[in-house]
Image (cartoon, rainbow, N blue to C red):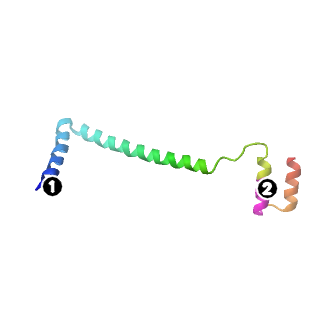
Amino acid sequence: MFLLNVFSARFVGRFWMVQRFGWLGVLLHVLFWVAVISLIIHLVRRSRLKRAVATNPAPNLGSNVPLDVVKQRYAKGEITKEQYDQFISDLQ
């Protein structure tokens, strides 16, 4: 019996909101929860992005970036030793 009273009170409360404010009240209620859920999603994504940036810092954008790219390509086997030597001599 108690549960029936609790559920009926909640229904009456929601029905009162519709009666008192009309459909504008329902719309504002829905918009409120959409805003809360959107805020939670935004905060979770932002924290994940900050964590990703903290664990993978941006590479040093100094003058050695082209040399680093050539070294990485040579290490991966994308270029030959002759091409590597040519690129190094061109960059220095």
Residue shown at the point (76%, 52%) measured from the top left: 69
User: Tag 2: residue type?
Assistant: Lys
Residue shown at the point (46%, 45%) measured from the top left: 43
Q: Is residue 5 above or below residue 29?
A: below
Q: Nearest to the eye among marks 2 and 1: give it.
A: 1
Q: Which residues are magenta?
A: 69-77
Q: How far from the left and from the top, in percent, is residue 86?
A: 88, 54
Q: Is residue 52 above or below residue 82?
A: above
Q: Using a 10 Å C-alpha cutoff, classify the residue at mark 1 as few (fewer than 14 neighbours), some (14 to 19) or many (20 or more).
A: few
Q: Is residue 78 visible?
A: no
Kindly state the secondary structure of the residue where label 1 is placed: helix
Magenta stretch: includes residue 72:
yes
Q: Nearer the viewer, residue 90 or 12?
A: 12
Q: Quadrant of residue 14?
A: top left
Q: Nearer the viewer, residue 47 or 72?
A: 47
Disc 2: which residue: 71
The first of marks 2 and 1 along the sequence is: 1
Q: How far from the left and from the top, in percent, is residue 18?
A: 19, 40
User: Tag 1: residue type?
Assistant: Leu
What kind of secondary structure does the magenta stretch mostly adopt? helix
Q: Nearer the viewer, residue 2 or 21?
A: 2
Residue shown at the point (20%, 38%) measured from the top left: 22
Disc 1: which residue: 3
Task: Determine whether, in the image, residue 91 is placed left or right of residue 23.
Answer: right
Residue shown at the point (20%, 40%) measured from the top left: 17
How far apart are the two marked residues, 2 and 1, measured between alpha carbons? 71 Å
Kindly state the secondary structure of the residue where label 2 is placed: helix
Task: Determine whether, in the image, residue 27 is placed left or right of residue 91.
Answer: left
